Each structure stands twice: as C-alpha cells, then as structure tokens.
Amino acid sequence: MKPGERATAEGFLFTDEYQLTMAQLYFRMGMHETPALFEHFFRSYPAYGMHKAGYCINAGLEWLLDWMAEARFRPQDLEYLRAQRSGAGEQLFDDDFLAWLSENGNFDSVSLQAIPEGRVVHPNVPLTVVEGPLALAQILETPLLNHLNYQSLVATKAARIHRAGRGQLLLEFGLRRGQDKGANAGARAALIGGADFSSNVGLSHILGFPPKGTHAHSMVQAFIALGGTELEAFQAYAEIYPDDCLLLVDTVDTLESGIPNAIRVFEGLRRKGHEPVGIRLDSGDLAYLSIQAAKQLDAAGFQDARIVLSNQIDELVLWQIISQIEEEAPLYNVDPEALIRRLVYGVGTRLITSRGQSALDGVYKLVAICKDGAWAPAMKISESLEKIINPGHKAVWRVYDQRGKAEADLLSLREENPRTMEPLVMHHPMEYATRRELEQDKISEIEPLLVPVLEDGKLVYELPAIEEMRSRREADLGRLDPGVRRIMNPHIYHVSLTESLWDLKQALIQSLSLKPGAGGS
Amino acid sequence: MKPGERATAEGFLFTDEYQLTMAQLYFRMGMHETPALFEHFFRSYPAYGMHKAGYCINAGLEWLLDWMAEARFRPQDLEYLRAQRSGAGEQLFDDDFLAWLSENGNFDSVSLQAIPEGRVVHPNVPLTVVEGPLALAQILETPLLNHLNYQSLVATKAARIHRAGRGQLLLEFGLRRGQDKGANAGARAALIGGADFSSNVGLSHILGFPPKGTHAHSMVQAFIALGGTELEAFQAYAEIYPDDCLLLVDTVDTLESGIPNAIRVFEGLRRKGHEPVGIRLDSGDLAYLSIQAAKQLDAAGFQDARIVLSNQIDELVLWQIISQIEEEAPLYNVDPEALIRRLVYGVGTRLITSRGQSALDGVYKLVAICKDGAWAPAMKISESLEKIINPGHKAVWRVYDQRGKAEADLLSLREENPRTMEPLVMHHPMEYATRRELEQDKISEIEPLLVPVLEDGKLVYELPAIEEMRSRREADLGRLDPGVRRIMNPHIYHVSLTESLWDLKQALIQSLSLKPGAGGS
C-alpha cells in the first residue's frame, strides 16, 4: 500500500459497503439519528479443530478506541462515495446524505461500555455495548468486530499456551506469519493473554517492553560459507553479547556439533566472568533433544542455562513435550521437573494465527432502538435456537460461589439488581425448563462486568496498562474451576438469564412469530 | 495504536529483534556490507487439515515494495535502540553500529528478483531472490516474509474457492474477521486469487474496484423494533436502491416470510421499470434453501434474480452445496445447472483466515555469500531431508510438455540454460536415484519465471494491474494438469534440479558433514 493510500484504506472507510448503503437508507427514512443499542459478543469458544476452549480472554478495546478517535469522514472519502454508481449508472450516494456524513462522519456521538481487556469472558455475554445514532453505530459494526475479534482470539490462545507451558517464560515470535500489519495487533494480544515478551521490535517499543530474540541459522551459515565454522559464529556472538548469549544449536547437528560448540563458548564466557543465557532448539524431537541438551549442559556445569524451544509450538505440543519429558528424562538421569523449569518457549505461527481456529465468531447485533423516547427491544429470530439474540438493554454480572470461584455469568435487564434477588434464579438462555436457584448466602460476590468507556465520544475510562490486564487475567483464571481451564473437553461454564430477561425474550419471540407480514402469515 | 506510534510499529523496526542483533554482529565482524543472496520460498502447499492444495498463487510483492520504499531508520528508532540494555544493563547496540544504521538503514542498496503476482507457484522454488549487503538483507527477512506469506496464502485459498464455485461471481466479505489492518492485505490477495469484488470500502477504493454489499439483518430488525415489518424494510430498500435491490431474506423466516416479501417488492420494482438484483441467504441449509428460493422466484417470473449465498463458505462447502443442488433440485423441478449459474458467493472468515491452514510456511534462507569477489554457496544441513536448502545462485524455469501443460518447475545454476540441454535431465530434489530425462522435442516451451524487480533499490519492473495478475493466474491454472488442480488429494507437481545443481548440493552436504568443528567430528 502506498503511504498516501493509508488514510483511505484504514480510516473511516475501513468498513463494509453495506454499512454505508444502510446508513443512507436510515438517513432517507429519517431514522439515521435515532438512538440505537448494539451489542458485541461471541457465540462459541474457539474449537481449534477438536479441543475446544473453556474460556476466552477479552482484548482489543484500546486499539479500537484509538481507531474511533482518529476515524473521520474526509473530503476525499466524500469524493469517492460520490463517484460510486448504481446498477443504472446513477450516483449511488446522494449529496444530502454525503453532506450529513461530512458533518457527522465520526464517532464523537457514540457511547460505549465494555468488559475490560484481560478479563476472562464467555459466549453470548455482551463484551462491548454501543449506544449511538443508528447510522453511525451501524457503520461502526465492521471496524469494531475487526479490532476486537482478532485480539481476543490471540489473547485466548496465548493464555492456553502459557498455562500448558506451566507458566514458563513465553516469547511471541509470529511477525513473519501474521496478516501484514495486523501482526502488531497479534503481538499486543499475545502480551495481554500470556506471552511475556515479543520479538517484534516496533510493537515492543510502543508498548514499552524490551523485544527478545536469539539469532537465526543464517548467521551460522554465513560464517560457514565464508570458510569459518559454527564454533566461530558462536564465539563471535558470545564476544559481542557476553551477557545475552543464547545460541541456536541446530544449524549443523544439534547433539554432535551445536551443543558441544555452545558449551565450549559458554566455558570461555564463564572464564571471563559472564554467565551464558542458554541455547535454542528449533527442529527435531524437542522433548528428546531438550533432555540430551540438559544432560550435556549439566555435565559441563551449566545447570542454569535456559533451553528455548521453538518450531510449531502450541498448547497441545507443549502438553506432549512436557509429558514426554516427565517419562523420558529419568531414563537419562535428568530430573524432569528441573528441566521443565529451565524451559522457555518461542511461539510463532500457531499463536499469531490461533492454529485450529483462526477467527473468533464475534458478532454485533442490534438489541434495542429508541421509539417515542423509550427503548424498544430488537431481535433477530433465527432458524437455529442458539442464534436468537438476547434483546434489550442489559446488565452483565459474574456470580461467585462461597469458595470464591466463578459460578456463572448472568445477564439481567438493565434496571435489575441480582444482589437483591432471593433466591437468585438463573435461567438457561435457550432451554425452557432449565433454571437454577441459588440462595444469596451461597454467593460470595456478584460483580458487574461492564464499565463505562465512552460517553458521547468522550473517554471516561482510565485505560489500564498491559501489566494490569495481565493481573486481571491471572485473577480471573484463578477464580475459574480447574475443569473450565482444561485444555481439552473443558467443563462448560454457565451463562444464564434472569427470569425477567427470559420472559422478555420469550414475549418478543412470540410477537415476532405472530406479526402480520412476518413469519407464519 | 495511537497515530503517532504507527511509523515506529510499521516502519523500519517492523522486524524481529534478532535481525538487529545479528546485523550488529555482522557489523562488528566487518561482514555487514558483504554481498549476500537470500531466497524466499515455501516448503509445502497449505494442507487445510486434510485436503492439501496442489498449487499456490503468488501474491504480495507490490505491497512489500511499497513498504521497502518507505521504511527508513529514523532518529527516533536510533534513540529507542540506544536505550535497549544487555543482560548486564549495558547499552545493547553500540553507537558506531547505530551511526551506520542511521546512514544505511533503508533498502536502497538491495536488488530483488521475483516471480510475478498472480502466477501459479510450487514448493521449494525461489519466489523472491534478494541480493544486498548482509546486514540489510538480513533485517529484511521478517518484513519480507510478513508481506508475502499472507497474501500468497489468501490468493491460493481464493483460487480454490473460485474454482470450486465454478467461476461464479465471488465476493470477499472478511474485513470483520481479519487481523486488524491486515484485513486489507487479505482483501487485496483475494482479489488477485479469485474474488471478483470485496465489501471492504477503503481497500476497494485504493485498488479501483467498486465495493459490493447487500444489507444486514439489523436493518430489518430496526424496522420491526420500531413497529414496522420486514416487508416495509424491503420496500424502503427497493425505493432507495431500485437498480441494486438485493435483499437478505433470513431475518424472520426465509421461505415463509423473506422470499415472499422479496417477491412482492420485486413485482413493485418491475412495475416501475426496474429489474431486481436478487436475494441473499445467510443461514440454514444453503443448498436446499437456494432450490426453494429458485422455485419461488421462477414461479413469480424472476428467473434472472441472483441468489447470493454467504455463511461459512469455503471450497469444500461449495463443492458440497453444488453436489447437493445437482441431486436435490430435480426433485423440485428446478434445473440444477440454471440454478448454479445464478449463484453468487459471499465469502468472509474462511477466505481471509484461509481456514484449515492459516499460515503459509514461507522461509527466507541464505543461499550464497560473496567471498573474495566470488559467490560461495551457503547451506543449512537439517535433521530432515526436506529442509535442506538448494544452495547458490540459481535460475528458475517452467517446462511445458507438447500439450502446452506445465510438466515441472526446474531449478538450475544461474549460468545454465536448460533449453540447450539434450536430453534435459531433471533430478528429484531429495532422492538420489530419482531422475527423469526429457527430449527437447517433447518440450513445447521452457519459460524463465523470475523477473528483475529492483536493481540497487531502483524499481526496474512495471508493476502490473490486478487485472493482469488475474489473467496470469487463469493462464497458469489453465496450463496445469486437471489432476494438479483437484481440491482434494491432487497429483503432486514436479519441482526438479538440473544435474549440476544436484551435484553442487551433494558436494556441499558432504563438505559440511566432514568439516572439523561442524557435525560428525
């Protein structure tokens, strides 16, 4: 993309065509400034092929807000839309609508509530609630989903990998496999969800993290092609980076050449008063090789040297590597627990693309619209029961049991307060007969999840640092039942409705099914 | 991301940390300006879980060139790198290296050859060849792979979907599910690979395509919530867009409400002298519903109304939809071929994320480096035979048989000319004993695939329009054997080496394995 094209492709027109044609329709019908309420939520956990997640980590809000603050309909955008033609060759967007967009084409009139970044979230729970003039809230659909779907997807994957790796240091290496500049959003989401650092220099810079890395095979290859050796390449690296010496040992032969050469270099470093950082393994059987590497390093007196594993790592691979180490290390007189504690993971492709499920199915649905000064709930009846939305202005609560564990997320009408309901009735979102009752004395806390973020376009929320998002993540994960955190076949967390919300939903389904000109007539 | 941060996160530092630490090492060793040759290639076709591709479509070059032309090491970048600390708390990048980067931190000294965008390409064939000062060619690795891997991945998926849809109109709808601004690169790649249009407004604008779209459920919902009906929503749409009337019919009930209402509106349009465009189906059994929709539309006299299918479409789903239509349509007296010819496909998530395989495994490897004024071939010996690279300065050829079909891609030494070899010997890239001989009179054409693009940073290549890339794609696909184009279990296309290149590779493997200080010693 040419530099001059960026403001066009990434600004206010970073949306779908139908948002603009619908906006003009609303304008023509006099509905464009009618207050409307849209909710963003996802419908199902990422399934990764066969092993479904039991939770997601919310992410992306701050970058969405940055985009909204910057996006403005420009004179060039107007010229472009004015040039669009209908099927009959006429101007598709009329001048009066374009004039209105020129005046109002920004998000300064939008209010927004959201669940903060880093928090554990679940399906069908409103994560972001947008209130604003119908036309602008409609145009916002595509960029909002774009910014939030992907970062939540990657933050979730990072959390899973981080847990599967038993909390060992996790490095994000995915820049070369992300979607163009979107790789920066992936690295940010990884840092929120579970990665400790990223190799991405520019992104690390703007977020205030030191970027991390080792070296590539090409460095060793270059030395060899010029008549040198792997050992000389390692020696050069150690000389220049004596306190950051982490050597990639698989360019020639890991066990016969790479590790012995690394150890010779490490011995030289230690004689000069420096401690090596460790080695990196990027091919082969990473479990077996890490055991052999540990054995060689230990024998040479480098028990603290880290062993970085990279190459197609994800949560299942880590689970298998650690299981294999536990079984195989004792055969070589290597302590498996000590070995696991010195491991570091470099994760590229499979994190930044969320291998197995590369999109979160987040959607943005109209749930209410202002009619004669009052909010009228809106709904889409669907052929599949799961896709029927929960209508109206709502509040979102997390209910904790007496152990302090999250018991369920509960959606209520906005004006309801579940803390005063005795017993608290939690209705299944789809099934008529399924409801649970909970006495208040079985509940340790009922926490509202949505916080006000924008009021009429004005930021009323203190944007947290990534460190704070990480603390939230760990706190929320700690309050999930272990069964919900399992990386395969997790226990399904409950998302329920209050009875009043359930009743509203049923009434609306019934009225829509009976409406003349709608279904069934 | 804040607007002021973009130049940092998307500029020269849009790379991995280890590229910079290696560059400093080369600088320290006096190797940083040594001419080096790197090749970019992918190792295997996307496997999409179970059904592997038989070809890829090359894409991304122009946007890489745009990035390279713009990326410059800035004073702010220098300040940032100067602030980085080693493990011992010292300055990680020294001032002399940073001064050199300030002078030379751009790609004005790099030469580049490439296979043009839109062409069919295969594994282990150099798609991009970079020649430049070692340090800069090294830093380029990450951004080059970032720009080329993803666009080639999506162009390939788009070509597969386009073919599975029998060449019917294909619309790219993926903006909400792409990776942040990377979604623009995805839409571009889709347009190169097989999509006719995109819903992405800004991206369509900069590429000169009209963006396409229909309307969303929320439009119908808004009317209903305000006391109106689906029919009134459709009527409003038809009134405002009489020559672009494409109605989404599944908000209430597709067969009982949506299609009958659409037909009433279409009748009104026709009375006023306008022809409707058609309807869109976004849920349910798309094959069955499209048959029923065709039946209703035909009975009402709208045989030409298009039926747009969206919702989780990819090449396998299209294959199944079309198979089902062929079997089921006759049961309802609907002509399956006529129905298939009126279908249009809107493809979102599964195209922009390349469902089943969301990253192409493109790599960038050092293959030669200048030593005493001559090129020394470089190699990485790997534990897996497939990962051993083909060394040295090479040329790339496509050999066509007498039918004009592509027979194989052939890698040769740069100075070789396969057109003069009689017979032409094509050696398997890994297996010792596997070679084929082809008489020149069995060959209709031997075509060089790489074209010069940059010479010392100067563009020496006329960048083709997307229309030209599409023509190349169709021409190349037409010259593949149908077995190679199959969407499942394709015939494996041959990529071979000349005997001289094979010999060089074997000699290098042997010399590396025997080198003291390397493997085996």
Image: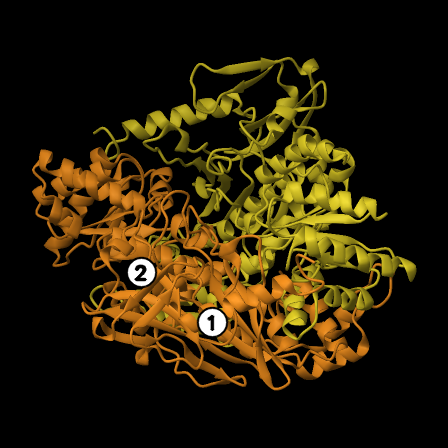
Chain colours: A yellow, B orange
Q: Secondary structure at mark 1?
A: strand
Q: Does residue B361 appear left or right of residue B417 in this picture?
A: right
Kindly report which numbered mark, 1 or 2, lies closer to the viewer in this rendering: 1
Residue A113 lies, with reference to residue A510, above or below; the image says below
Q: Amino acid at mark 2?
A: Gly
Q: Does residue A480 appear left or right of residue B314 in this picture?
A: right
> Label 1 vs label 2: CA separation?
22 Å
The reply to whether residue B2 is visible in this rendering is: no
Residue A101 lies, with reference to residue A23, above or below; the image says below
Residue B446 point in image, percent of width and height:
30, 75
Residue B217 point in image, percent of width and height:
35, 43
Label at residue B128: 1
**Residue located 20% across and 66% down the image:** A88
| Mark 1 in CB contact with mark 2 (< 8 angstroms) | no
Q: Label 2 is found on which chain of the structure?
A: B
Asked whether B445 or A155 is in front, the reply is B445
Q: Secondary structure at mark 2?
A: loop
Q: Amino acid at mark 1?
A: Thr
| Among the 4 quarters of the image, the one containing residue A165 | top right
Q: Earlier in the sequence, mark 1 or mark 2?
A: 1
Residue B30 lies, with reference to residue B331, above or below; the image says below
Residue A405 point in image, percent of width and height:
68, 24
Asked whether B484 or B471 is in front, the reply is B484
Asked whether A63 or A85 is in front, the reply is A63
Residue A54 point in image, percent of width and height:
56, 31
Q: Which residue is mark 2?
A: B194
The reply to whether residue B429 is visible in this rendering is: yes
Graded by Cα atoms within 10 Å as few (under 14), some (14 to 19) or many (20 or more), the crowding at tag 1 reads many
Q: Label 1 is found on which chain of the structure?
A: B
Asked whether B334 or A272 is in front, the reply is A272
